[in-house]
Image (cartoon, rainbow, N blue to C red):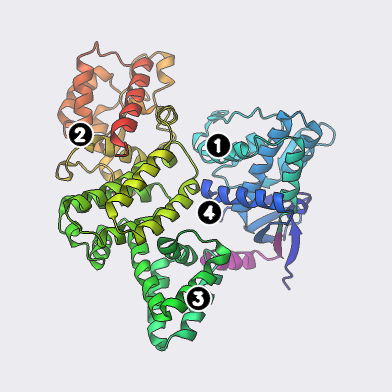
Amino acid sequence: MIVPKHTPLGDLYKSNAVLVVPKYQRSFDWGKNEVFEMMTDLKSSMSSGSALFLGTFVFDISNKSEYKIVDGQQRITSFTLLLIACRQRAKKLKFHSLAQEIQKKISFTDETTGEMVSERVLVSSSISDVFKFISDERWDGEFPTKIGVKQVKLQTRKLKGLYDYMAEEIDTFGKSDLTSFLKAVYSTYIIQIDIQDELEAFDIFERTNARGMSLNVADLLKNYLYANSEEEGYVDAKWNEISRNAGSTLQRMLKYFWVSRHGSVSKNELYRKLKSYGKSEGAKNLTDGICNFSIYYSAIQSDNEKIIHDWLNIEKCEEITSNKGYFEIFTSSIMGLNHFAITQHYPLIYSITCAYKNSKRKDQEIKFFLNVIKNIEKYHFINNKICDRVGNEIEKPYAEFSEKFMNTKDFIVTSQEFIKLLKEKLATREEFESRFSQLDYQTLTLSETCYIFDRINNFDLKPSEWLKIYDPDKDIIQNHYNTEHFLSQNPDYKVNVEDTEVVDNIGNLFIISRHTNSKLQNQRPSDKVELLKDRGKKFRYVSEFIEKFEKTNMDWGKREILNRASEMAKLAYEEVWKIK
């Protein structure tokens, strides 16, 4: 018999058992948005003194020395990473006794040597090497790119941004603040469910993950609509469509529906607000409004041009869908935003579209509409994709402007005010250029590299002149393009050691066709020029680079690679992704 129990998080870290993420679990995929919410909730708990509820955790305890985390690995991994940040803060404050106590929560140690025997939480293999490295009490705060002979840049990339954010959030804490914060962490409680059978573990894992986000608000709202609608069959059909369009994120979609019309709302207030809206507008109108928004919600994240085209036609934006250039500008920006894996813009773009739809829709309004959408893409590339800012930092201003756009009487004026906000919130050129010039082959996916060079190549061209290098379909990219190292990774000739250190830097990279890439092999840069002049000429940025390269003495090493990276960063910020 399963008996749920109330467990403070501090008690979980006192267990004699190792907490293990099973191999069948997905990779660790929490990002800054989730960690932002976690830190906000913890600081609120620290101020109020009320314990934070972290949800339900399920453990397979059939092996008494090794508890398998059936449900809860994202949360427990993130909290353990936070403890590492707290340990480092305690060390910086020379609060060594506290640092040692925190270390006992992070790892098991040999009582005779004091050395770490094992981490308490054995995390997903996608981050396990670096996580073990930083769990060690002797860690100096620097993240590794290689452990032994193993490259761990991707693991570091996943963890470092989250860790840096956590460390920054507690960087102002003195000894008493850090103590109070840890009390909030340890008093955070979970509902713990222990099971003894692996088949039962798989069953619970599948059921808990199939539901996605909690549907409490959705269930309540559905019941309200049924109870207050004169046509039960109508609500039933519409709700099926809403659920289908929302997928596993129905509660998020309902929140964004509200935000698109009325601005910010907390999770606790959402149902009450929706119910009140239903009472004023009628249950049928609320059902229709949510259903219409769900069609948009499905389209905006689909990366499917036909679905986006159909939604714009539903919104009667035929002047966009009937003009191939306009439509390509719109879909290109939407697909770029989807590539960044953010969602804060969903309600905003819906509100902007509604505001545009209610405008005069002449040439000036069309240009403003497309420009605003492009600027949102540019903002998130700079702030989130490159500078690794938290997406939530713009969520509240976006919510405020969603309401403004929905109620505006002057689309152009509101658009101008919004663009001004984006400029004010934008990361500085120095921050961007520093981050961009450090991009490299080991941490960039092929899709990310294609996106960057697509935008650089097509900058200031008309849509009819674009060469489509980036595609949301990864298989299409892999079938057509590859990353070329101008200075080869495995050259057939002698290369200075200092030059090989930057061979993966973005300043040494191109995107070219797979066939051309296979022909270039490991030749010297100067020997690749003729083939690139011929086969690379369809890529404007390659032709421009080769033309410039031939005017020099055609040396290509560390200095030239870093110079090109710096030039690309400057071009990116001041021209390609400039908010206009």
Q: Is 120 on the left or on the right of 354, as rendered?
A: right
- Return the residue at label 3: 221
Q: Is 298 on the left or on the right of 520, as rendered?
A: right
- Return the residue at label 1: 160
Q: Is 275 on the left or on the right of 327, as rendered?
A: right
Q: Amino acid at mark 2?
A: Phe
Residue visible at 45% across and 50% down in the picture: 397
Tell me: residue 244, above or below residue 388: below
Instruction: Report if residue 197 lies within the magenta region.
Output: yes
Farthest-out residue, top: 553
First reached walking from the N terminus: tag 3 or tag 4: 4
Range shown magenta: 190-210
Give the foreground label among 1 and 4: 1
- Out of 531 and 85, give the one closest to the viewer: 85
Q: Which disc number belongs to residue 539?
A: 2
Would you say residue 108 is visible in this rendering? no
Give the foreground label among 3 and 2: 3
Q: How far from the left and from the top, in percent, is residue 83? A: 69, 42
> SS for tag 1?
helix
Please identify the quarter of the rendering in which residue 203 is found. Answer: bottom right
- Return the residue at label 4: 26
Residue visible at 32% across and 32% down in the picture: 572
